[in-house]
Amino acid sequence: MRLKDRVAIITGSARGMGRVIARRFAEEGARLTVCDVHDCAPVAEEIETLGGEALALKIDVSREQDTAAMAKKTFDRFGKIDILVNNAAIIGALEVKDFVKPVEKLVSADWDRILAVNIKGVFLSCKAVIPYLKKQGSGKIVNMASNVAFTGLPEFIHYSTSKGGVITMTRGLATELGAFNINVNAVAPGLVMTEAMLSTFPPDYSEDVVGKQLLKKEIQPEDVAAAVLFLASGEADMITGQTLAVNGGEYLH
């Protein structure tokens, strides 16, 4: 198993992409902290059914005291931290009519809400976990970016900006943490068929996106989980500061 005896924290793992990543990590032998603003107990139960071990926490990654508690409780439970997957983000959690707006109609509250989770949340989660990784002299951080960081997306300027920031932060962290044997990479999915995506976009939107891809099939959460697993595993020990696009060839990065 590729993550045997590894301890991983996966934010935003109550449902959707995070849940799929958590299950895949458990299948590969990881012990997990699953955390979200939503209840993660069902995910933890699924993992335990698979024979794994999981700690379920309810946290808001935009709150520093929550991310600090996340790291401490993980260390107290498992005795170490090896992997952090920054998956928590806002997109489908908002009503489309409130979320999709021309730039001139955005208000500061729209901007602040997106960046508080998608940028500040990544920063705070890293800040909380990095001291533990430094102390043990190794670790893997995988940040969830998005294809829209490269392509842009009309009326989603706050979301596109946040995901571009994740890529920039990934490079900055990799530069700073390489001396401590800590790898920092990002995964940039295209349009993935999660509950959030299905509730955010109209039914024909996915057909339009697939039509622009070189590979004419929908991207599934399992496709993204495989990329995250690779970057979190020993197979990626000499990869850092990179962004792996899982987008069916929609954009050639």
Image (cartoon, helix red, strand yellow):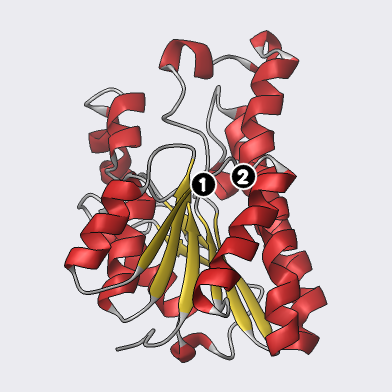
Image-quadrant location for residue 129: bottom right
191 above or below 168? above
**Left or right side of 220 for 131:** right
Q: Would residue 214 be visible to someone looking at this image?
A: no
User: Residue at the location (66% across, 73% down)?
Assistant: 241
Which of 154 and 54 lies nearest the eye of the viewer?
54
Image-quadrant location for residue 170: bottom right
**Left or right side of 97 for 86:** right
Q: Would residue 153 be visible to someone looking at this image?
A: yes
82 above or below 100? below
Q: Secondary structure at mark 1?
A: loop
Which of 215 and 244 lies nearest the eye of the viewer?
244
Sequence-first disc among 2 and 1: 2
User: Residue at the location (48% across, 71% down)?
Assistant: 8
The amino acid type found where label 1 is placed reads Ala
**Left or right side of 115 for 150:** left
**Left or right side of 23 for 128:** right
90 above or below 64? above
The residue wearing badge 2 is 61
Q: Secondary structure at mark 2?
A: loop
The amino acid type found where label 2 is placed reads Val
The residue wearing badge 1 is 88
